[in-house]
Image (tube, helix red, strand yellow):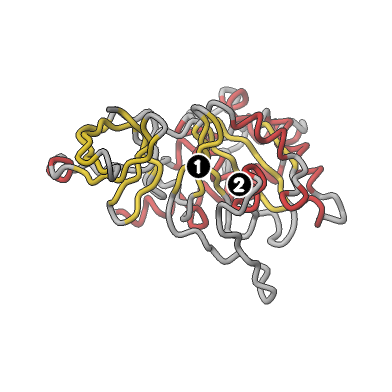
Amino acid sequence: MQGIIIENISNLYKIESEKKVYEATARGKFKKDEITPVVGDYVEIQITDEEKNKAVIEKIQDRKVYIKRPKIANITQIILVVSSKNPKPDLYMLDKQLAFAEFLDILPIIVLNKVDLDDNNNFKEIKKIYEKIGYKVITTNAKQKEGIKELMQVLRNNINAFSGNSGVGKSSLINAIFDTNMTQEGEISNRNKRGKNTTTSIKLYEIDKNTYIADTPGFSTFNISEIESNDLDKYFKEFRDNIQKCEFIGCTHIKENNCGIKTAIEEGKIDIGRYERYCKIYQELKEREERKW
């Protein structure tokens, strides 16, 4: 039988197959082959006890996508949740996540949540910036279920991972989608206005046939070190058409003159804030690479 891993707790796997959920362990051969089943994996299982829904994982199908941290496979769409307020929008984190989504070739969707708390409507400017680049941006108020219908349409026929800092409302959005308290909602610390991470395991929730969403911990320390610093510009979508206009091959777009990216900024084609965050991410990657040696 074939199925999909929907949860993994201490190497005990829950596998959905033919509208049933089986509890399974993995064969020892996976350890020998240095591969571990993860949530999102499509697997072949052998039923060991039909009455108690017990099984063993025999084979892991080839993965289309694999993310190391948090460990999840085969997601086709990543929902990048940003809070409009409490906590304040973290666009540096968002741009790192967008670059990584481009690197993995996963479609990113930006969700600006808690728009009701943004009295100055700053979220509208953020929406404008990213829509101009070509990203889909959805504004939501999870508590009042505003924007949830539009979000649900986008989720269909995908394995969707929800990503974002703690406290931005990932769990609240999932609860609004299912109209139930399926995930534990985080509480925002009044002292520092930063989120407290309450999700402890990765789990796929089925919305509809072939449609899943994942609540995933670990993205608050998002690591994109798989991207080489010199390749980062390829994963800033709006940079691509302007890279060829740089005078120097291998231009980093930071210290060089006659740079196509800097010219595009002057012409209003590239947002200056995005560029500044690119420089910061580039430097972070460069320093990490130098520490390796």
Residue shown at 55% from the left, 54% from the top: 183
Q: Position of residue 92 (x, y in %)?
A: 61, 51
Question: Is 119 left, or right, of 196 in this rendering?
Answer: right
User: Would residue 123 be found to the left or right of residue 196 on screen?
Assistant: right
Q: CA distance from mark 2 to mark 1?
A: 9 Å
Q: In the figure, residue 96 lies in which quadrant?
A: top right
Residue, disc 2:
174
Q: Residue furthest bottom?
A: 191
* Label 1: how many Cα within 10 Å (few below 14, some 14–19, many 20+): some
Give yes or no for contact between labels 2 and 1 (Cβ–Cβ under 8 Å): yes
Vertical position of residue 37 compared to residue 193: above or below: above
Kindly identify the amino acid type of the residue bearing the numbered disc 2.
Ile
Compare residues 194 and 238 and report the one nearer the observer.
194
Which quarter of the rendered picture does the N terminus lie within?
Answer: top left
| Relative height, residue 264 to residue 292 (above, below) | above
Disc 1 marks which residue?
205
Which residue is depicted at the point 50% across and 42% down?
205
